[in-house]
Amino acid sequence: MIEHQIPKRLMTLAYAASVALMVGYALWLYAMGDYRDLLIPTFMTLLLMSALLMHIGQGLKSYLPRIILLCSTYSVVLSAFYYHPGASPIWLGLPVTATFLLLPLWAALLINIAIGPLWWLLPSVAATPPAIIVGYAALTLLLALPRWEHARLRALLRATDPNDSDCNAYHIDTLKERLNSEFQRAAMLNQQLAVLVVHLPQLDMAAEQFGHRARTALLGALCSEVNSHCRDHDVLGRADNATFWLVLPDTSESGALLVRERLQRALSERVLVETGQLEARIAACLPSRAESFERYLKRLEARGTSLANV
């Protein structure tokens, strides 16, 4: 599932509000004497409480409680249409809106396009006028339009801005272009080239426990320390979510190891409020003789993966 970032505090509020609404709906059905309809809201209340606990807890994928919340929304609306044929079709907008809020754009579009015709199999929905169908399609397009425009602007910014959107380092595309230039330059001039692969194991933990601000502070601290302890023509770029490449032109293996020791000492002395002492795993990777650039890129990516799995 592609990344769709929503602040953790906002999602916590959404899960808590959904539990409160589901409890209120179940109590209202109990007060009205609709005991036949009470089973699904009661069960969904337990599911939403588990989703809230999974969201607050650590070590679980963020999309799992979102899927539970989305399925609960669809189940409650479906049961309402099934048990109450006279229910207003305006409630169709609730699962449509929840899909676009909780899922990435293309996943939300595919789900709404696939499930849309199935709603009209229900007798209460099939009896509605054709204007409801137009309204359903219009709501889907209106909810998709802001997300699509945001994605288009981000892609345009990424194509024109060489820097990463979260820190003072080159974006992966620009990083590969600069590395390719240095690789060809080193081969033509018979010079040496070294790359330090830097991994931040604290990054995911900081984002889960302390939010986006702590994650940004961690990335900023790393880039600040690396840029202040390197030469002006050295290139720092973000290769992955928590992995960076530091390109060191005209640098031998011994020189790269000295830079690694200097960076590890400087980073270990940096202390942040939320995460404490800055921790970084650094490894040197030099191209071999007669090695192609594509093969070298694969070795760099494999080195980053090995550092992440230590």
Image: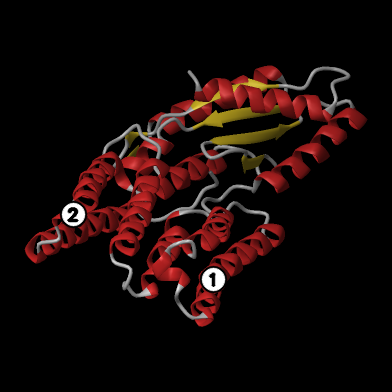
When asked about the image quadrant of residue 259, the answer is top right
Residue at 29% over, 58% down? 14
Q: Is residue 156 above or below residue 207?
A: below
Compared with 46, 137 (above or below) is below
Q: Is residue 226 left or right of residue 245?
A: left
Q: Furthest residue to the left?
A: 31
> Foreground: 281 or 205?
205
Q: Residue at x 7, y 64 (%)?
A: 31
Viewer-side residue, 65 vs 299: 65
| Neighbour tally class for label 2: few under 14, some 14-19, many 20 plus, Cα within 10 Å | few
In the rendered structure, which disc, 2 or 1, sits on the residue that comes first in sequence?
A: 2
Residue 118 rendering spot, x and y as whole percentages: 51, 59
How many circles with numbers are drawn on the protein?
2
Residue 186 disc label: none
Q: Label 1 crowding class (10 Å Cα cut-off): few <14, some 14-19, many 20+?
A: few
Callout 2, which amino acid?
Answer: Arg
Q: CA distance from mark 2 to mark 1?
A: 40 Å
Horizontal arrangement in the rendering, residue 283 relative to residue 70 (left or right):
right
Question: In what element is the residue under mark 1?
Answer: helix
Of residue 138 and residue 8, the one placed in the foreground of this image is: 138
Q: Residue at x 52, y 50 (%)?
A: 167
For the point 47% across and 44% down, the residue is: 219
Label at residue 36: 2
Which disc is residue 146 wearing? 1
Per the image, label 2 sits on a secondary structure element best described as helix
Residue 188 visible, this orientation: yes
Visible residue check, residue 92: no
Depicted 236 relative to depicted 25: above or below: above
Tell me if 101 is positioned left or right of 81 in this view: right
Q: Residue 13 or 245: which is nearer the viewer?
A: 13
Q: In the rendering, at what x and y percent does residue 6 appear?
A: 40, 56
Residue type highlighted by circle 1:
Pro
